[in-house]
Amino acid sequence: MPRRWVFIPFVLLLAACSGPINSPYAPGEPAGRTLFTAFSERPKHLDPARSYSEDQYQFVANIYEPPLQYHYLKRPYQLVPLTAAAMPTVRYYDAAGRALPADAPSAAIALSEYEIRIRPGILYQPHPAFALRADGSPRYLPIDARELARMRRFSDFRELGTRELTADDYVYQIRRLANPRAQSPILGLMAEHIVGLRELAAELTEAVKDLPRDAYVDVAAPAFAGAYVVDRHTYRVRVRGKYPQFMYWLAMPFFAPMPPEAERFYRQPGMAERNFSLDWQPVGTGPFYLAENDPNRVMRLRRNPHFRDERYPDAGEPGDAAAGLLADAGRPLPLVDEVVFTLEKENVPYWNKFLQGYYDASGISSDSFDQAIRVGADGQPDLTPAMRERGILLSTAARPTLWYLGFNMADPVLGGLSERARKLRQAIAIAVDYDEFISIFTNGRGERAHGPIPPGIFGHRAGADGINPVVFTWDAARGEARRRDLGEARRLLADAGYPNGRDAASGRPLTLYFDTMASGPEAKSRLDWYRKQFAKLDIQLVVRSTDYNRFQDKIQKGNAQMFEWGWNADYPDPENFLFLLYGPNAKLRGQGENASNYANPEFDRLFERMKDMDNGPERQALIDRMVAIVRDDAPWVFAFHPRSFGLRHGWVANVKPNQMANNALKYRRVDPAARVAYQARWNRPVLWPLAVSAVLLAAAIAPAATAYRRRQRAGVRERAGA
Amino acid sequence: MLDYILRRILYAFPILLGVNLLTFTLFFMVNTPDDMARIHLGAKHVTQEAIDTWKREHGYDKPLFYNADAGGVARLSETLFVDKSLRLFLFDFGAADDGRDIAREIQTRMWPSLAIALPTFVVGLLCYLSFALLLAFFRGTALDTGGVVLCVALMSISGLFYVIAGQYLMGKLWNWFPISGYQPGWAAWPFLVMPVIVGLVAGIGDSTRFYRALFLEEIGKDYVRTARAKGLSEPRVLFRHVLGNAMIPILTGVVVVIPRLFLGSLIIESFFGIPGLGSYTIDAIQAQDFAIVRSMVFLGSVLYIIGLVLTDLSYTLVDPRVRLE
């Protein structure tokens, strides 16, 4: 064996010992301006036309840049330009194509045209699709099959290039939404709004029929009136009628730019087999690019060397300056050079590695909640002394989410707008105590819901004005809502024809069915809790647990009687919650998102007026009326709005929970020296167990050795007979 | 012997076809292509149109076994079963539902699986055989009784407990190894030690007891008494004669496992963050990715059959009386 091989174990040992020996990172890595975090599920898609979940957005939103973004610090959530030079201008036209004033009534508006002007000089990240030969032709388009055969990893493309972001890239991406190969989840929704998108989708669907699966589809070829380029840096999007919520969509990655040459590059034969695709290697203009994509292990975002001059905001909410959130005001972004996402599927190792300092931030699972949080006498959550000792900080925020218990309004017992059914639902709404649920099953991480609109979104009312009078009364002395007495629920139940939980006509006990995706031992206590809530009214609850698919199928076909459901805001507008109760959106009728199949003509009329209005007193009045109708009809038992709890180490700065923005990584700052010092302090190896193990081993070997020697000296008969 | 191997390979085809048929039937008994589309399209804004497009783009818009709209042979060939399952016999695994190439994933992921499974298997086998021989050597003594009690205790504890206890003690409390994670190449070794130790400890109870029982059965036979009568030392009797004659049942359990080491361990890989084939399979089942599930089941079946053939071949090596005809 060559002598140099002898040194390999020592070299490995030394390499491992240059930091804490239990460090999961390469030596020296934590000393850089790097943010360390984790992801629990490998993202399926990184194509901005297709990505639509948080696990995908944490990458996509930091790489791709739509024209708008949410202000990082200001609340309520406020849209500001990202790549746009200014906020889009909107022009309205009537059915005859005549321009209308900005304050024209919604009914008169047949078309809205959004004009977006992007900043000139924005460059894409380095990417082989932009690499050019000396004669200006694309270096890798077409790529030689033999050359491609040598490409094992994406980094094997040695020649990279860039180019300026143009308006054409944005229009191209809007066209991509119609590409059946892109399978955009918002195609159905956007086809209702963007002019000509449905027709474009139909044409492209026909065009791709005979094409191989990975072939390039020229989405720019068919005629399309929905979006067009005005000049190199300006484009317009044409939307049917008045649809003010479209502005929010312009802050989502669906409307980020896509350079056509990137798609042509990836759609070459042989690329997909090597996992070279837009789903695998994004190409954007954002603060980071995906430097390493091993979704089985680690995803690494690195600073985009061509990133433009974007600065940390210099204004926020009152209190932000005191919280140190404006300390970096005016500094160029991003404030870290790299973000390392490690795959961590299980909560226990994630939590332990956070405590060791190997992750900069962590959520709090139910398992570790008591270790991290204690609830003070005032009911407010606070860190435990153990967390404080480590300099860990807590951030909480209301999530723009609603959980509810839904009734199927098409059900003959619970559904419909009859007085009998309404009173039955109201009785259940009083009996099911979600305050208790929040306390038991979410560790208090939730806020009781009184209506469909979560806090922080226009239309939500707090305090005495915001309570659900069907279920609560206002205790002025204590300044809080109090759940109505169970006696009232029983009275409502009796009025509904079920005195003491029995059908007055037949005398049979009232039995209701609760459909849920929850099953197994973890869900048992929660389902038992539901049974107990209904038992308060002597109603027998039958729980029908099923899997996700069967559950979806039941809801789709209206076969469920009661069910748990939730909605997370796409954008911070009341329309995004109230549309869940709009009659034409009923799943049974229109395959929309109205899972309860609720339809109230007055509510629907008000919704149609409210959805296109700008925020203001008039819109608030309409929303108040709509919420009152829903509370009275009670198609849902409003459960709670969850609160997010996040922990971070003291060396991480500029953390303010922003439930709408997914591109917040560029604002984060770390203090690597502090991190390295804490990691060294918290991870000193404990060696005494090795000594104890050695002693125990010796203690076990000694009698065995003695017995062995005695056995060896023994005769054959003794050895055989033992 | 060549005839025998050829025959076994030919036998493998109907077995694999049966496995494919069973996997296909079971999978589509609980999942329809619509269900699969819904899972992949997410919970929001999903229309029937989007579901139909997904099915068409992923080739799930055909009937399962019989295409009444087609004519002739196409009635059977233009079906999901033929389209999705028969290509596997050419080891053409195709793409996962998220578009990623399955063969490439398998090639990438089998190495981390092997990095855990191989040392656990080799070191484990040596340890378990040694412990079992030790207990057999001290049979009937307090050491033997203590060892058996310890083995029973160890095999009574859930494997998950060893994982969590190992991570807590060696990773968190004593700071010896990274709690989870993986690095490619030589940098992988700090991440492998703890899973291997945990794997060893988790398997020590039942394996040692099993091998001990085999050895005790052999120890009572005449040839062992003869060996002792010849004056051979006890270690020589145990390692040369008893171990040699107990090899057939040992090989039956061991050789069949060897090819399947590539497939990894579901729990160990998931908890220690090892990007192997075990976690790949679990993720695919959870995501209802039929393309991956059928590929992994097919691969598992092929490796199992290879393991069985190797086991038969290994008998001829350890027992000259065995002939494969």
Image (tube, coloured by chain):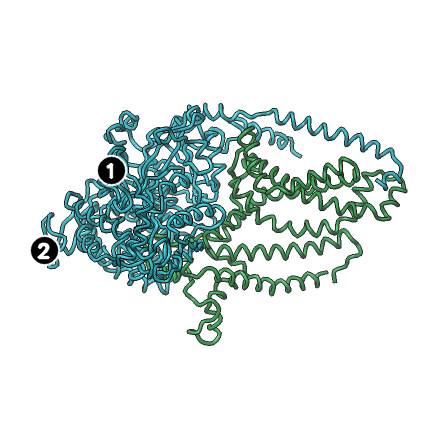
Chain colours: A cyan, B green
Is residue A178 visible from the viewing direction of this image?
Answer: no
Quarter where residue B201 is shown: top right
Across and down, in percent, residue A615 comes to 18, 44
Residue at 43 percent of width and 43 percent of height: A293
In this rendering, position of residue A211 left or right of residue A495: right
Quarter where residue A604 is shown: bottom left
Label 1 crowding class (10 Å Cα cut-off): few <14, some 14-19, many 20+?
few
Quadrant of the rendering where the N terminus of chain B is positioned: bottom right
Which of the chains bears the disc numbered 1?
A
In this rendering, position of residue A29 left or right of residue A122: right
Which one is nearer the viewer's eye here, A606 or A210? A606
Task: Reply above or below: A583 against A333.
Answer: below
Which one is nearer the viewer's eye here, B32 or A6? B32
Quarter where residue B34 is shown: bottom left
Q: Which mark is residue B207?
A: none
Gap in angstroms between the C-alphas marked 2 and 1: 46 Å
Q: Amino acid at mark 1?
A: Gly
Is residue A288 visible from the viewing direction of this image?
Answer: yes
Q: Earlier in the sequence, mark 2 or mark 1?
A: 2
In this rendering, position of residue A197 left or right of residue A554: left
Task: Reply above or below: A166 against A176.
Answer: above
Q: Secondary structure at mark 2?
A: loop
Q: Which residue is mark 1?
A: A463
Q: Amino acid at mark 2?
A: Arg
Q: Secondary structure at mark 1?
A: helix
In this rendering, position of residue B324 left or right of residue A418: right
Q: Which residue is mark 2?
A: A98
